[in-house]
Amino acid sequence: MTDLERRQDRAPVPSGWDYAPAPEARDIVTLEERYGLYIGGELVEPKSGEYFPTVSPASEEVLAEVGQAGPEDVDLAVQAARDAYDNGWSAISPAERAKYLFRIARILQERSREFAVLESLNGGKPIKESRDVDLPLAAAHFFYYAGWADKLEYAFPHRRPRSVGVAGQIIPWNFPLLMLAWKIAPALAGGNTVVLKPAESTPLSALLFADVLRQAELPPGVVNIVTGDGRAGAELVKHPDVDKIAFTGSTEVGKAIQRELAGTGKRLTLELGGKAANIIFDDAALDQAVEGIVNGIYFNQGHVCCAGSRLLVQESIYEPVIEKLKRRLTTLRVGDPLDKNTDVGAINSKQQLEKIEELVRSGEEEGADIYQPPCRLPEKGWWFVPTVFTNVAQSYRIAQEEIFGPVLSVLTFRTPDEAVEKANNTPYGLSAGVWTEKGSRILSMASRLEAGVVWANTYNRFDPTSPFGGYKESGFGREGGLHGLEPYLDLEESEVRG
Amino acid sequence: MTRLPVRKTYKLFVGGDFPRSESGRTYEAQGQNVARASRKDVRDAVRAARGAFGKWRGMTAYNRGQVLYRIAEMMESRKEELAEFSSGREEIETAVDRWVWYAGWADKYAQVLGTSNPVAAPYFNFTIPEPTGVVGIVAPEEPALDGLVGRLAPVIVGGNTAVVLASESSPLAAIELAEALATSDVPGGVVNILTGFKAELAPWLAGHMDVNAIDVAGADGEIPELERLAAENVKRVVRGRADRQSPYEIAAFLELKTVWHPIGV
């Protein structure tokens, strides 16, 4: 440590600083009082007759009422998708299909601020994240897959790519529009039609996306959106005329879907939970690593399946890392998602908040030490202070179970072998992080970690060209990149050998 | 006086050894008493496969390719015996050539199936295929030998280890193959072969929490039940076909790993 660093280390924490409010204007979003289901190119009233309120988790304010799709509604949506598939979409020239996707990408870019505000309003995530991460990536995803639509035969040597049919897609609430893009873009590029079921708590950006489809003049029925709770998803999964199911969500529900589809021959891809290890070696650039730790677990309130929720610190640097981390935590701004200075927004739902609280209680009861920076939380809405647990044993629930909130569990290790063993000691296998300045160690760790994505000296980076998905109980199939096309194509070999 | 031939005892192949079934049971197939494996034999075989996984996946691709080629050599020299227990010479030759074909893929599939990804930020980003782990294979009933080889070769060339349930009605060729494997350079535990009743054994394999993937090629009517059991640990289920030979058969048992690193000075 240099003198300067030592002095900085002793510098008082700027906890007294207040930031003037910097709210993003909300009036860019126009909300309807009530939204129907998007079926056959129109918003229609649900046959179920049921609606449910959707709220802002930062204020508990009701934003709109949204239709609850019943069995009949899901059936109509699947029929609309089937009709669209049979009557044109699967036969349209791939180059034209590409152009629809390019249009969608462009319209998302044009309307990105509107979407960003809506996403923060309905989901609780900080506007700087929805503006700088969710929206650019969602548009980029459509742009990337647009270009694949008329080049599929170059992607898989010796195979004949053909569309699969109707894809049923179920997405989570943590990145509502981005997950929509991850699902819909490759499906349409492959010539399929879609029935999408957004998450119960975050339906609004998907319903606004329906308006993008209108502007893009996408033929009716190519994309259908059925809102509602898990019942609507279950109907979609078991619908006999759906050819492929893609699900992103909890491992528990993923397993239930895999069971439900057993013996049907339907295609399935699952992107499930995670409990990623973020591993810091003693030769890492510590300040960068601390930023990576913070980004790894507090990005999007920790509502990230690939969040670096288990910090593995090499014993010799445990103290400086924890000290720097705690100090950094005191500077995180928790509060109004629509404030441009906010780092950590609202917890997505009351139910999720209760789950986080329950697991945090278990951590305290099992004997871990809890640290939470001083923090004023708004009175209304659902909030959780960024939390660090130290003195965590591998057997504790907070080291084993996915918390899906801003809660970090810190463990230590001595040798690279021990780090690998601890990192892999979980049924999950979605992602991992490695921080070291030694290149050979990065490559050795990257090869030994059982994870679909390994971030070295960085964390939580995403890109449409980069495949994403899990090992083990984190699911199967990849989204993004060339590999992300495969789930949406029937890839018969052009000539079978042997 | 004619000489009385010395008969062979047909046993299981687990961890490089030839144990009897721990249950002490046998059943009669192709005129011989054959070991009838039990749930515990499945467990032992999975343990052997897991134990062998680290070393096998850690070998260089070139090395794995040579080991597979060596299997072809060993089978070629046992052609007569193998032909006796299968549909004949032609099946054996097909199977031997299959090993040779897959041997050549060992150091190539990663170049066909992997990618380097031009992300829109200063990061080096690549995707490489890696073995999924322990793979259960319910081998096709027919062709008993070539069907097994056709499903096994793509699994192990990718660095996985395997627990195979041999053809129930024609198990002898599988055991003969095990003897060829034991005298080749395949490390013990990489391939484990069980004989017995598939309906009894396959569910244990499909539900086993330390099996990463299962190929239900020879499972017929039991597939729905096996797929249900597989969900317990989100197992990859492959509905393999005996006549398939392609690098995509290797891909079916591979995971894709994407690695990011910043580019900077």
Image (tube, coloured by chain):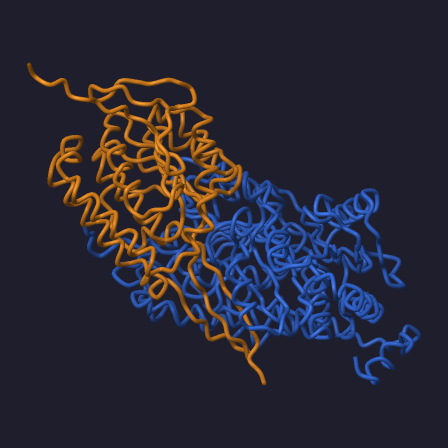
State which chain is coloured orange. B
In terms of depth relative to the viewer, which is nearer, A215 or B199? B199
- How many numbered marks appear? 0
Relative image position of residue A110 (x, y in whole percent): 57, 77
| Residue at (48% x, 63% y) in the render | A467
Left or right for B175, reference A278: left
Left or right for A91, reference A408: left
Work out whether A360 lies above or below A295.
above
Q: The N terminus of chain B is located in which quarter?
A: top left
Relative image position of residue A445 (x, y in whole percent): 55, 62
Q: The C terminus of chain B is located in which quarter?
A: bottom right
Relative image position of residue A15 (x, y in whole percent): 90, 72
Left or right for A461, reference A414: left
In terms of depth relative to the viewer, which is nearer, A393 or A13? A393
Q: Residue furthest front?
A: B1
Relative image position of residue A56 (x, y in whole percent): 75, 58
| Residue at (84% x, 75% y) in the render | A21
Work out whether A462 lies above or below A252.
below
State which chain is coloured blue. A
Q: Residue furthest top?
A: B1
Work out whether A394 lies above or below B9.
below
Corner quadrant of residue A3: bottom right
Corner quadrant of residue A254: top right
| Residue at (35% x, 36% y) in the render | B164
